[in-house]
Amino acid sequence: MKDAASEANMTVLAIILIAVIAAVVTPIIKSAMDNTKQQSECLQGGGTWENGQCNNS
């Protein structure tokens, strides 16, 4: 019975760790995707991307 309880605790711990990692990584990925979208829209519009900003010359 102790083995089953230990295995259940490890499963709960794994689920919690996955949730924490997802909560941390999701905003980072979203920010990177938004930045890439802005950069591609700038370049498609004929601008240049410098220092995190679009320069339309």
Image: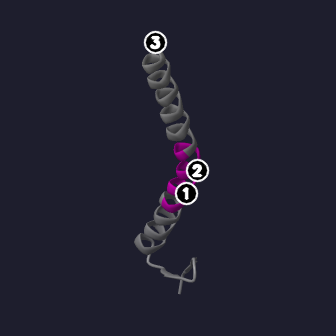
Which comes sooner in the sequence, label 3 or label 1?
A: 3
Q: Which residue is mark 1?
A: 28
Q: Residue furthest front?
A: 2
Q: Amino acid at mark 1?
A: Ile
**Residue position marked by numbered label 2 in the rendering:** 24
Q: Using the numbered discs, state the Cα–Cα distance from disc 3 to disc 1 in whole angstroms.
A: 42 Å
| Residue 12, x across and y down, in percent | 52, 27
Write down the quadrant of residue 53 in the picture: bottom right
Residue visible at 44% across and 24% down in the picture: 7
User: Total marks drawn?
Assistant: 3
- Displayed quadrant of residue 4: top left
Which dot, 2 or 1, sits closer to the camera? Answer: 2
Q: Position of residue 16 (x, y in %)?
A: 56, 34
N-terminal of the two: label 2 or label 3?
A: 3
Q: Residue at x 47, y 61 (%)?
A: 37
Q: Residue at x 55, y 57 (%)?
A: 28
- Circle 1 sits in a helix, a strand or a loop, which is it? helix
Compared to 22, does 52 lie above or below?
below
Q: Secondary structure at mark 3?
A: loop
The amino acid type, in three-letter code, at marker 3 is Met
Q: Is residue 44 magenta?
A: no
What main secondary structure does the magenta stretch of the protein show? Answer: helix
Contact (Cβ within 8 Å) of mark 3 with mark 1: no
| Cβ atoms under marks 2 and 1 closer than 8 Å | yes
**Residue 1 tag number:** 3
Camera-near label (3 vs 1) is: 3
Magenta residues?
21-32
Residue 11 percent coordinates (x, y): 46, 28
